[in-house]
Amino acid sequence: MRREDLPAPESGLLLTHFLTVADVPRSRAFYSEVLGGEVVLAENPCIVKLANGWIIMNPGGGPTPDKPDVTLRPPDDPGTATSFLNIRVADIERCHREWSALGAEFLTPPIDRKAELRCYLRDPDGYLIEVGQATGLLEGILADPPAGPGQG
């Protein structure tokens, strides 16, 4: 394990994304073998370096001294999301094709949203992942308006 592979800045800050997962080996395999990340630490916590960021994974559990009123668990309703991982790519068609061949299950193929092409998939625990490629945004074209309440 090399320091430069760990999410441990020498100054300032960096952003990581933590996921509570039901099965660490299954999730580690998804983020490394399907999405192409590099396993930096296998367990406790699992850390996968993915492009210029890190996914940190651990099983759920009850409160700890630093989060006394919080219980961690994977999502239990795939129809509701309060946050999601957003991955930006240079070639979404290629990404969709390659990740699908490796077992990723996308909700739809890439769809043109004017500012970007985008599609979504889920990881083994049901976490939603957006994959997007900037297109019109590079020319000042904004995305379609967000869906209204109840239209997700």
Image (cartoon, helix red, strand yellow):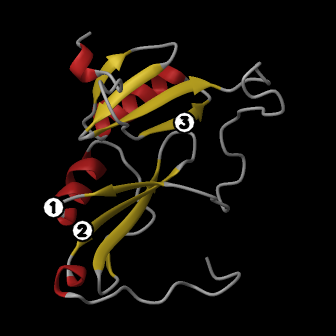
Determine crowd level at label 2: few under 14, some 14-19, many 20+ residues with C-alpha closer than 10 A.
many
Q: Which mark is residue 133?
A: 2
The residue wearing badge 1 is 90
The residue wearing badge 3 is 19
Is residue 125 rendered to the left or right of residue 16?
right
Residue 26, x across and y down, in percent: 47, 26
Query: Where 76 sits versus 64, above or below?
Result: below
Residue lying furthest top in this view? 1
Give me the C-alpha separation between circle 3 and circle 1. Answer: 25 Å
Q: Amino acid at mark 1?
A: Ala
Residue at the spot 54% in from the left edge and 48% down from the top edge:
127
Determine crowd level at label 1: few under 14, some 14-19, many 20+ residues with C-alpha closer than 10 A.
few
Q: Quarter of the image containing the C terminus?
A: bottom right
Determine crowd level at label 3: few under 14, some 14-19, many 20+ residues with C-alpha closer than 10 A.
many
Q: Earlier in the sequence, mark 1 or mark 2?
A: 1
Residue 19, x across and y down, in percent: 54, 36
- Residue 11 falls in which quadrant of the image? top left
Is residue 83 rendered to the left or right of residue 133?
right
